[in-house]
Every structure is written in structure tokens, then in C-alpha cells.
Image (tube, rainbow, N blue to C red):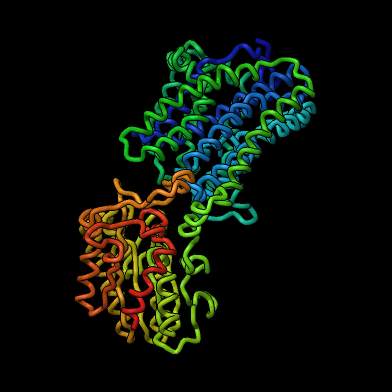
């Protein structure tokens, strides 16, 4: 083998492909698919990080071979090859997903998000688009974006845009003996800066001047160190390879496999990612790459077996297709057991077709002229972007169908409190005095609406009732934060922010003219172990019985504190929650279903709703008996004759499985007007 320079990989022939790397790709894509299919692989999403390390290694080695031969990098050739390798298959995926979304996805934002993500994916910016429109990777909105997985492709393509320039500069500088270590220094510097960004952000701190879309889970700046790790291995390949004998390779390979397996079960969707734990799969992948320098060791031979290599060959297509298949399958058959696994298996077919008849033929084109390349780019990019723009526009206009437009208008808009910024962890004392106040000049008894998003979704009812009664109204709510005098924690509402909001708002209420305080909160806290509560930060627990006692005593304390300053309190029983197998989420309906005019409403036995919400309902009734607070139960409106419903006439009552629509809130006005009067 011809030796490279100190910082240039040895010029290995293109045909001398390492099968163990293909096997490692197979493991990476397998873990991601298993995670998305709901199989017991809690850290399966880290397969993407394995891909990043491999990409850094392979691309650096490939560019190093070119530099060793010609002392230059033909950037136009490199980018053209990357385009042919990645974009046609991606364009086919976006086209298929956009068409399917038009037929079966919801016009209540899901179709728009799909279209935006598809355009972003084709323009190398899906990660930025997703970060802005979908939120966190593990958040509920992400689960219905069939192009969510393209975020990592955009990060990788952004790496391909920048990293060759870094290497080119490094190799240019390395021609001078004084700067012969420039490639290692530049790659290492990029990696260290990126690693520092990821670790600082993992502590919860925000880095000044760094836009949020450039960092975090989807950000290239917090992921570049993973590419750099693979790149550094490739830069020093000629130094490392002679040292890796069979036994050393075997040892490194075993350590690498063990590290990956431990990572898969040590990490889960609650882990801070990327963060300190990300080091383990990155280092493990590096061990496996180095082990492959000794191809005779058992681990590398195992990874290079034919089944692994075949899966590795189609890993790109499989990564592309598996997630849309799972998303659409869950939309069509949400209650069918194992449907996600079946969908993941079914995605093998389009993956094989794409690889065999699209990826390989275009990838293997030789002597492609500029004119032909321009034609390939146009044919690849224009149709899916035009289709995506068409879906975006159609969904925004309700497909120019009156039924769709009316349905969207009735359930999509946010409630008035949310629109005005009152549904945040900001106490009234920290806002402008006129903020979140309605009918400020009203001469009646002041009314205060407090609680979580289940208080916010009552905004229209309370605003209309207080207007009729000439009462001033102040709204102060916070998502996933019950108005309860306890320490409370969840993934959506960190302990400190919720506790501070409740305490500050309580202090503010005690300083205001006495009035009527309406307290409303979701019933889910009483039954879900996702939430913890306790009398102190140290005593917080998600044990249901203990937590229920804590929540009850905390609510009792809240009401007593309010009553002690002359306020009257109204406790609102939660609206029926349509849990599985029943659903009230309007996003389950496609534009075609809505346009058909059929009754979209679902029904649920009241007994089923009571079973899921009984702990919360009983506690609210008990607290009212202890304190003398009034109770407003809206159940009779939603569940006449013991059957809970999601639709009355043409009015759909819910925005999702637990929050009611603006139209429903307006229908509740008489109930609130009666109890306030």
C-alpha cells in the first residue's frame, strides 16, 4: 500500500471498499428503524450519530485519496457526486410523501409541515425547518411529520458543503513544513468547538449569539464533532493501520460492540442529546472503524458478512422510507397492534426498488457533462418542490372546499389567552398591567382565570361571560403546570418554572381586589407517571397514590390561601378526555374525509371517561367540600345521556384528545355566566 503524508490518508483504490463499514451502517440503520417501530431499543435513535462518525471517516478518506493523486480537490465533481448519490432518492421520497399526505394527512398543519419539511430537505435545510415548525424530536408534533427523519440528511449535507473546504485549506497549508499539521489542527479545532457547544448546551445554558436553529438536537454546530471524530481517524489512517494487529483489532471491535449495545439501553428519549452520553456511541464507532484496519479479526469479519453488507448497501434508502411508512400506517390504523413494525418491514420494498433502479444507475453515471448534470438537477428538484408548494397552498386554503375551510376555522386557531401570550410561565406581576386583561373598565366583581392549558382552553367562555356581566378578567395560565401549591415536575414544565409561576401568581392574586378565581387543570396529572409532585423538591414522587395525596393537599392549600384574602374560588372539573381506543383529535381526519360531509364525531361511554378521570374528579369534589369552593362540572354538556361526544351538529368540539376547540368554548359561555352571576 502506498503511504500517504502525515495528514493525508493513503490513496486506497475506490474499489477497495470495507465490508465491515457496510455492516456498521446496517447496525446503525437497524437501531433507528427498531426505535421508530416501537421495539424495545430505547436508545435506537443514536444510530444517526453512528452514521455521522462513519460519514466523517469515509468522506475524509475519499477526499484524501483524490488529494494524494492530484494535490487538489475538484469541488464541482465532489458536489455533483454527492448530489447524484443522495438527492434523486430523496426527491422520490418527498414526491411520494407529498402525494400520500394530500390523500391521508390532516390539513390542520400536518400537510403544511410535510410540505415545508420536504422543501427544506431538498434545499439542505430540513433540520432548520423542523426545529422551527415541529419542535423537539420526541415531542408529539414530530411523530406525525413523515419527513422528520430528513433532519439528519440536511445536517450531513451541510457537513459536505463545509468540511471539504476545511480539509482543502488544511492540506494546502500542510505543504509548508511549518504548518504540516494544519489538517489535523483545523479538523480538531472544528471538532473541539462543536463538542464544547454540545456539552455547554447539555447543561441547559444558552450560548450567546448562537441561533437556536444552529444548535441543539437538530443543529449542525452541536453535531460537527461527530463528523470530526471520524475525519481525524481517516487523517491518521496511515499511522494507525500498521499498529492494528489481529488481536488488537479484535479487542477494539469487542469494546466497540459492547459500547454500542450499552448505549442502546443506557440512553432513552429522556436523555440530554447530544450530551455527555453521546461520547459513548461515538467512541464505540471509532473503535469499530479502527478495528476494521485488521479485517481478519472476528468482529470485523462478522460485520462484513453478506446479510449485514446487503442491509448496509440499502441503508440510505431504508432510512429514507421506513419513517414515512410508519407515520402513515399509524394514521390509517392507529389501534392495530404491531402496525409500526409491519410498516417498517414493508418499507424494505421501496428501499430495494429505490436502491436498485434509481440510486445505483444515477450514482454509477460516468463522464457526466455540465449540460447533462444541469438536466439531472432540474428533473430531480423541480417536480417535488412544485408538488410540495402545491400541497402547502392547498392546505392553507382548505383545498378551496367550504367544508374543509369551516372545519379548519373551527378547530385550528389557538384560544384567546394563548394568542395574547397569557399561556406562558409568566406571572401577572411580571407583565404589563394591561397585558392579559379583558374588560378592564368593568364595574363588576373581578374574575381571574388560572391554571394550565385546560384553563386556557376555557378563555372564550370566560371572556364572553365576564363581558356580559361587566366584570374585569385577568388570565394567567401555563402549559403543563397545574395551579397547585406543590412542587411539580414534568418534561414539559421543569420544576423551577412551574413552581415559580404558581407562587408568584398566588402572591399577585393576594394583592389584588378580591374576586372570583376560576381554577382549571388537566386530569392527566393524577393518573400519569410522567408527572411528579410533592410538598418539597426532595419529596417529589410519581407514585400514583402518594402523588394524588400531594396534589389534593396542594390544591386545598391553594384554595384556602385564596379564600383567606377574600376571594371566592370556582374549581372546574376537567372536560372528558378521549383516551385510546377513542379519539377526539381532529387531525385524524384527512381533507377528503372532511370534504365528504360525513359525521366526523366519535362517541365514548361516560363510564370510560369517569374511569380515567375519577381520581381527579373525586379530589376536586373533596377539596370543594373541605374549603367551601364552588364546582363547575361541564360534563353534562359533553356527555348527555351518559354518552360523551366530540361533535354537535356541524361543530367539532375538540382540538386534540384533551383540549376543546374555540367553538366548544363559546358554547360553554352560559354555564360560566350562570356560576359567575
Q: Quadrant of the N terminus?
A: top right
**Vertical order, 319 against 661 (above or below):** above
- Seen from the viewer's position, the closer of residues 144 and 596 is 596
287 horizontally vs 607: left or right: right
Residue 673, quarter of picture:
bottom left
**Vertical order, 351 against 275 (above or below):** above
**Count of picture labels:** 0
Q: Quadrant of the C terminus?
A: bottom left
> In this rendering, does residue 306 appear at all?
yes
Task: Please tell me which residue is depicted at 33% across the width and 74% down the height of the picture.
Answer: 671
158 horizontally vs 565: left or right: right
- Seen from the viewer's position, the closer of residues 62 and 547 is 547
178 horizontally vs 54: left or right: right
Residue 526: x %, y % from top left:
27, 59
- Seen from the viewer's position, the closer of residues 106 and 255 is 106
Residue 191: x %, y % from top left:
61, 38
**Vertical order, 141 against 375 (above or below):** below
- Seen from the viewer's position, the closer of residues 87 and 189 is 87
Residue 621, quarter of picture:
bottom left
Amino acid at each position: 500500500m502506498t503511504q500517504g503524508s502525515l495528514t493525508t490518508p493513503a490513496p486506497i483504490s475506490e474499489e477497495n471498499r470495507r465490508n465491515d463499514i457496510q455492516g456498521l451502517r446496517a447496525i446503525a440503520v437497524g437501531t433507528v428503524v427498531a426505535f421508530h417501530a416501537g421495539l424495545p431499543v430505547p436508545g435506537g435513535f443514536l444510530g444517526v450519530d453512528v452514521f455521522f462518525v462513519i460519514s466523517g471517516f469515509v468522506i475524509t478518506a475519499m477526499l484524501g485519496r483524490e488529494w494524494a493523486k492530484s494535490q487538489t480537490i475538484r469541488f464541482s465533481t465532489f458536489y455533483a457526486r454527492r448530489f447524484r448519490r443522495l438527492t434523486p432518492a430523496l426527491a422520490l421520497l418527498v414526491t411520494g410523501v407529498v402525494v400520500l399526505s394530500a390523500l391521508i394527512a390532516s390539513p390542520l398543519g400536518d400537510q403544511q409541515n410535510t410540505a415545508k419539511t420536504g422543501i427544506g430537505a431538498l434545499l439542505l435545510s430540513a433540520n432548520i425547518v423542523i426545529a422551527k415548525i415541529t419542535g423537539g424530536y420526541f415531542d408529539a408534533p414530530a411523530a406525525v411529520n413523515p419527513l422528520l427523519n430528513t433532519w439528519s440528511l440536511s445536517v450531513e449535507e451541510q457537513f459536505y458543503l463545509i468540511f471539504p473546504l476545511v480539509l482543502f485549506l488544511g492540506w494546502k497549508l500542510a505543504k509548508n513544513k511549518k504548518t504540516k499539521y494544519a489538517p489535523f489542527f483545523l479538523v480538531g479545532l472544528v471538532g473541539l468547538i462543536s463538542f464544547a457547544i454540545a456539552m455547554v448546551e447539555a447543561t441547559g445554558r444558552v450560548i450567546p449569539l448562537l441561533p437556536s436553529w444552529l444548535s441543539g438536537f437538530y443543529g449542525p454546530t452541536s453535531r460537527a464533532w461527530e463528523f470530526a471524530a471520524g475525519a481525524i481517524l481517516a487523517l491518521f489512517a496511515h499511522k494507525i493501520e500498521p499498529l492494528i494487529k489481529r488481536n488488537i483489532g479484535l479487542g477494539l471491535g469487542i469494546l466497540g460492540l459492547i459500547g454500542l449495545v450499552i448505549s442502546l439501553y443506557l440512553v432513552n428519549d429522556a436523555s440530554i442529546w447530544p450530551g455527555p452520553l453521546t461520547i459513548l456511541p461515538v467512541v464505540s464507532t471509532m473503535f469499530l472503524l479502527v478495528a476494521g484496519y485488521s479485517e481478519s479479526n472476528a468482529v470485523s469479519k462478522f460485520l462484513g458478512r453478506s446479510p449485514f453488507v446487503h442491509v448496509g448497501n440499502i441503508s440510505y434508502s431504508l432510512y429514507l422510507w421506513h419513517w414515512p411508512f410508519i407515520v402513515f400506517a399509524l394514521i390509517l390504523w392507529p389501534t392495530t397492534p404491531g402496525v409500526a413494525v409491519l410498516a417498517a418491514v414493508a418499507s424494505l420494498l421501496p428501499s430495494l426498488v429505490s436502491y436498485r433502479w434509481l440510486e445505483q444507475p444515477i450514482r454509477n453515471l460516468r463522464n457526466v457533462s455540465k449540460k447533462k448534470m444541469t438536466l439531472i438537477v432540474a428533473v430531480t428538484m423541480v417536480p417535488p418542490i412544485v408538488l410540495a408548494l402545491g400541497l402547502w397552498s392547498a392546505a392553507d386554503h382548505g383545498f378551496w372546499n367550504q367544508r374543509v375551510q369551516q372545519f379548519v376555522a373551527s378547530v385550528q386557531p389557538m384560544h384567546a389567552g394563548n394568542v395574547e401570550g397569557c399561556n406562558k410561565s409568566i406571572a401577572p406581576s411580571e407583565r404589563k398591567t394591561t397585558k392579559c386583561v379583558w374588560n378592564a373598565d368593568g364595574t363588576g366583581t373581578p374574575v381571574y382565570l388560572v391554571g394550565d392549558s385546560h384553563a386556557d382552553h376555557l378563555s372564550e367562555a370566560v371572556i364572553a361571560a365576564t363581558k356580559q356581566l361587566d366584570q374585569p378578567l385577568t388570565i394567567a395560565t401555563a402549559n403543563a403546570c397545574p395551579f397547585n401549591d406543590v412542587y411539580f415536575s414534568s418534561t414539559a414544565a421543569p420544576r423551577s418554572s412551574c413552581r415559580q409561576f404558581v407562587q408568584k401568581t398566588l402572591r399577585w392574586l393576594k394583592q389584588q381586589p378580591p374576586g372570583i378565581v376560576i381554577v382549571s387543570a388537566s386530569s392527566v396529572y393524577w393518573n400519569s407517571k410522567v408527572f411528579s409532585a410533592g410538598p418539597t423538591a426532595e419529596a417529589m414522587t410519581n407514585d400514583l397514590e402518594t402523588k394524588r395525596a400531594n396534589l389534593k393537599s396542594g390544591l386545598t392549600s391553594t384554595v384556602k390561601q385564596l379564600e383567606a384574602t377574600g376571594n371566592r374560588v370556582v374549581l372546574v372539573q376537567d372536560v372528558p378526555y378521549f383516551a385510546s381506543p377513542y379519539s377526539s383529535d381532529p387531525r385524524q381526519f384527512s381533507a377528503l374525509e372532511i370534504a365528504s360531509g360525513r359525521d366526523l364525531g366519535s362517541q365514548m361511554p361516560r363510564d370510560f371517561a369517569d374511569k380515567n378521570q375519577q381520581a381527579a374528579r373525586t379530589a376536586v369534589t373533596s377539596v370543594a367540600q373541605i374549603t367551601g369552593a364552588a364546582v363547575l362540572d361541564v360534563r353534562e354538556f359533553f356527555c348527555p345521556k351518559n354518552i360523551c361526544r366530540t361533535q354537535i351538529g356541524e361543530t367539532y368540539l375538540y382540538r386534540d384528545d384533551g383540549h376543546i376547540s374555540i367553538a366548544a368554548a363559546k358554547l360553554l359561555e352560559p354555564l360560566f355566566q350562570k356560576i359567575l352571576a
